[in-house]
Amino acid sequence: MAVAIELGPLKIAAREMGIPEGRLTNPYLLAHRAIMDATIQYQREMGINEPVEFIFDRLGTDERIIREGWDLFCEFGLRPELRELRNL
């Protein structure tokens, strides 16, 4: 599964809604949330019946934000892993 966030429209929408730049406008955070929500909501429909590994690209990622936002998902026994994806 992959998610792409267009930066231009994101900035325009945030500005029009009066949302200051920060976590709520972070494209990595939005993509992370979309992937997590879709995986948890539709894992059975996608035929996922075993533990899922979530791997995040370290390149351009604020690891602190990912780790801070992970608390809820730890309740499901999940742990994030950050790698440089170009090395896979």
Image (spheres, rainbow, N blue to C red):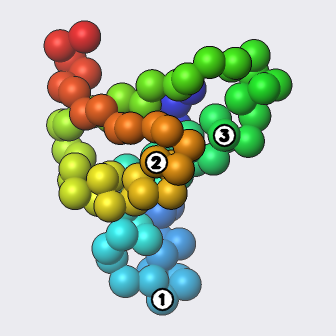
Q: Is residue 48 above or below residue 26?
A: above
Q: Badges 3 and 1: C-beta atoms under 8 Å apart?
A: no
Q: Residues within 10 Å of mark 3 (few under 14, many from 20)?
A: few
**According to the image, label 3 marks what residue?**
40
**According to the image, label 1 marks what residue?**
18
Where residue 32 sits: x, y (%)? 46, 47
Q: Is residue 51 above or below residue 30?
A: above
Residue closest to the eye, 18 or 51 = 51
Please tell me the numbered disc located at residue 51.
none
Relative placement, left or right, of 55 versus 58 is right
Q: Residue furthest bottom?
A: 18
Relative placement, left or right, of 61 versus 31 is left
Per the model, the C-alpha gap separating discs 2 and 3 is: 13 Å
Residue closest to the eye, 5 or 23 = 23
Kind of element beneath mark 1: loop
Q: Residues within 10 Å of mark 2 (few under 14, many from 20)?
A: few
Please name which of the two marks, 2 or 1, marks the residue nearer to the observer.
2
Which residue lies at the image location 25% right of the left edge and 21% below the top edge? 85
**According to the image, label 2 marks what residue?**
74
Q: Badges 2 and 3: C-beta atoms under 8 Å apart?
A: no
Kind of element beneath mark 2: helix
Q: Nearer the N terminus, badge 3 or badge 1?
A: 1
Residue kind at label 3, given as amino acid type: Ile
Residue kind at label 2, given as amino acid type: Cys
Residue closest to the eye, 50 or 29 = 50
In the rendered image, which quarter is residue 58 located in?
top left
In the rendered image, which quarter is residue 88 located in?
top left
Which residue lies at the image location 32% right of the left edge and 52% below the top edge? 66
Which residue lies at the image location 36% right of the left edge and 29% below the top edge? 55
One can see residue 10 in this view: yes
